[in-house]
Amino acid sequence: REVDESIVWLQISPNTLRPENTGSATTDGIELAGSLQLTRYLRASASYTWLDSERDATGRDLPGQPEDETHARVQLGPETVWKLVGEVEHTGEILVNEGGSRRLPRRTVWNVSAALNLAALPGSGVSRFVPELWVLARIDNVTDTAVRDSFAFPRPGRNATGGIEARW
């Protein structure tokens, strides 16, 4: 990928970030992705990305991009009735400042979720009103790994969400 002009946020002091035009840059990389439905009740997917990005003028690494990322997901259950999902996200080291002295370390985050379609339950009567009524719960960052974004700002640790989704 050839980049003509790009803006990245660089850390210039412990408490200060500034936007900087990187000028032209070149990114070489590999991306692999695949998914597989093993049975009606078991699905798996995974993706891997490796990037090598350099500013054309200086040959230095382009800040704000991880060296590599991996995402894998396993889903159990009949997709129209219930789903249990486990995910793992691995992010490689991220360069934060231009000089290379500030880098965010590699990290691995685990997420889980569960969902139930109340309309698909026999005798529930919900299907008379809507064909799908999902109740769902999700926990992100189950292991409470310290995660920072590409600006080096901390992201929330473990968090849980829930919801109801209707489709008609």
Image (cartoon, rainbow, N blue to C red):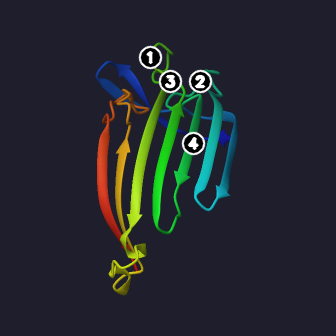
What whole-number distance in Å separates the C-alpha atoms at marks 3 and 1?
13 Å
Amino acid type assigned to the residue bearing label 3 in the image: Arg
Neighbour tally class for label 4: few under 14, some 14-19, many 20 plus, Cα within 10 Å: some
Q: CA distance from mark 4 to mark 2?
A: 27 Å
In the rendered structure, the answer to whether residue 153 lies left or right of residue 107 reads left
* Depth check, front residue: 15 or 160: 160
**Left or right: 113 in relation to 77:** left
Residue 144 percent location from the top left of the image: 35, 30
Total marks in image: 4
Question: Badge 1 local density, few (<14 within 10 Å), some, or many (20+)?
Answer: some
Quadrant location, the C terminus? bottom left
Q: Which residue is mark 1?
A: 102
Q: Quadrant of the N terminus?
A: top right
Distance from disc 4 to disc 1, alpha carbons, whole Å, reads 28 Å
Q: Position of residue 11 (x, y in %)?
A: 39, 24
Q: Please provide percent x and percent y for residue 123.
A: 36, 79
Q: Earlier in the sequence, mark 4 or mark 3?
A: 4
* Residue for point 46% across, 67% down: 81
Mark 2 sits on what residue?
61
